[in-house]
Image (tube, rainbow, N blue to C red):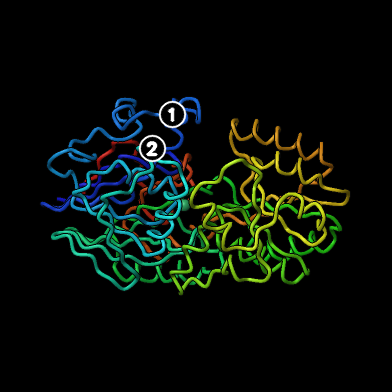
């Protein structure tokens, strides 16, 4: 008998922690933070968890002996990460160091770089973790369970889905994936490989089942190019730090419109780390003539910031103020004090290239952000393409993989799967701590 326990990722977006047990072999697929549960109790920076005991007590992370740092008998043979987003990986800091963590090479680079940039804390500590990296084509052997990682396309490089081979058949796991991105071919590879293994169960993400959209990365490029071409003043662009596809898009636009892309110190540090993975082909933040690094105004700089400032071509608010028509500045809604210093002139624009607010908390933040833009006289353009698969494409992938059963994960609307796809396969509903036997 094979047992699948959903410690997270069931009826919620993210927080994936799915244990598969077969005889003596126990693997945990992803070890992410349940951000929704965490936000019910904590709000940074004034109310943060103190230690893992608090998180366990509040039910944010599972009560499972041997899972955490310093505990005895390891609760799992291995943790296997699909990608580096925090809702899939953040809890590894808490993990029992006797449990090895398997992930792609790029995921390891991103986790190390982002941990290096954050300032300590028990949720940001990779010391002593036994990382083991894999790539597509590998077969990871854990005794009764063998895991086949297959690359997928998502909004962070180095993302994988898994085919978990057990004594009772194969369980396919999507990780986070999309079929409309620049590397849709990788998601197709996953679907083809999964089909060939005739999975008994497909653990499938459904973030976007409630909000379909058809924008692709090339449309983002096309539309953002139009905005930049028609904007005479400063262009500001907001996109996620680790979304290298989007960074590439804005880098290309800068090249084609005779501007430079001014990236944050964080983005520069991460890009610099990713150069170690030559397959990614991400731009070089230090030597690329169309990239400069924006140096925020502050009294002291962290060690990693100094490292970048010393070797990159850096620009300050004053530099940007005097060359607004020549710059695309990567900025988030938290950078408004910098924009205040830059003092944008007329005819500028703000391109928001990340998801629109979809909950109350985000709405409040958005309102504040719009107040700032109104103050500066910057029109807001929403130009984004999601990292998650769209409803019709999800149906096509499920039809192609043809699993005997499907379990919706990474969605707040698992019931929608049933209504939308019950003609394709049997849908099993799970909640936190649900156990499925195969
Ligand atoms: Zn993700």
Residue in the foreground of this view, choosing between 423 and 289: 289
The percent coordinates of residue 419 (x first, y second) are: 48, 45
How far apart are the alpha carbons under marks 1 and 2?
Answer: 10 Å
Q: Are marks 1 and 2 in contact (CB under 8 Å)?
A: yes
Q: Is residue 141 above or below residue 15?
A: below
The percent coordinates of residue 147 (x first, y second) are: 25, 62
Q: How many marks?
A: 2
Residue 121: mark:
2
Q: Is residue 417 above or below residue 171?
A: above
**Left or right: residue 386 compared with residue 37:** right
Residue 193: mark:
none
Q: Can you see residue 170?
A: yes
Q: Can you see residue 391?
A: no
Q: Residue at x 58, y 57 (%)?
A: 309
- Is ligand 1 within 8 Å of the beta carbon of the residue shown at mark 1? no
Q: Residue at x 70, y 32 (%)?
A: 368
Q: Residue at x 55, y 46 (%)?
A: 301
What kind of element bears circle 1? Answer: loop
Crowdedness near tag 1: few (<14), some (14–19) or many (≥20) residues, C-alpha within 10 Å: few
Which residue, given by chain and number where applicable, does mark 1 sit on? 48
Q: Quadrant of residue 234?
A: bottom right
């Amino acid at each position: 008998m094979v047992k699948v326990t959903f410690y997270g990722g069931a009826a919620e977006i993210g927080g994936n922690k799915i244990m598969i047990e077969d005889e003596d072999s126990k693997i945990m697929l992803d070890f992410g933070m349940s951000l929704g549960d965490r936000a019910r109790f904590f709000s940074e920076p004034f109310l943060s968890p103190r230690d893992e005991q608090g998180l366990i007590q509040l039910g944010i992370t599972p009560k499972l002996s041997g899972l955490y740092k310093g505990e005895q008998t390891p609760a799992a043979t291995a943790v296997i990460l699909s990608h580096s987003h925090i809702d899939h990986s953040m809890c590894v800091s808490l993990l029992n160091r006797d449990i090895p963590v398997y992930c792609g090479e790029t995921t390891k680079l991103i986790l190390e770089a982002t941990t290096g940039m954050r300032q300590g804390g028990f949720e940001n500590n990779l010391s002593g973790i036994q990382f083991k990296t894999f790539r597509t084509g590998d077969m990871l052997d854990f005794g009764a369970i063998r895991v086949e990682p297959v690359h997928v396309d998502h909004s962070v490089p180095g993302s994988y889905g898994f085919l978990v081979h057990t004594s009772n058949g194969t369980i396919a796991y999507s990780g986070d994936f999309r079929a409309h991105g620049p590397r849709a071919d990788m998601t197709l590879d996953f679907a083809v490989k999964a089909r060939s293994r005739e999975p008994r169960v497909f653990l499938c993400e459904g973030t976007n089942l409630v909000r379909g959209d058809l924008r692709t990365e090339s449309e983002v490029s096309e539309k953002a190019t139009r905005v930049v071409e028609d904007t005479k003043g400063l262009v500001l662009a907001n996109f996620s730090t680790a979304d290298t596809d989007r960074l590439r898009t804005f880098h290309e636009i800068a090249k084609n419109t005779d501007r430079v892309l001014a990236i944050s110190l964080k983005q520069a540090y991460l890009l610099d780390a990713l150069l170690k993975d030559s397959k990614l082909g991400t731009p070089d933040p230090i030597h690329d003539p169309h990239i400069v690094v924006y140096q925020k105004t502050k009294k002291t700089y962290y060690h990693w910031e100094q490292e970048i400032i010393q070797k990159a071509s850096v620009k300050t608010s004053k530099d940007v103020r005097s060359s607004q028509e020549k710059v695309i500045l990567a900025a988030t809604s938290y950078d408004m004090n910098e924009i205040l210093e830059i003092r944008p002139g007329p005819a500028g624009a703000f391109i928001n290239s990340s998801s629109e607010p979809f909950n109350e908390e985000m709405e409040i933040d958005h309102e504040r952000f719009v107040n700032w833009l109104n103050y500066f006289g910057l029109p807001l353009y929403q130009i984004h393409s999601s990292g998650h698969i769209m409803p019709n494409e999800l149906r096509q992938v499920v039809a192609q993989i043809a699993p005997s059963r499907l379990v919706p994960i990474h969605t707040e609307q698992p019931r929608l799967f049933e209504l939308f796809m019950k003609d394709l396969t049997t849908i099993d509903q799970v909640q936190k701590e649900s156990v499925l036997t195969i």
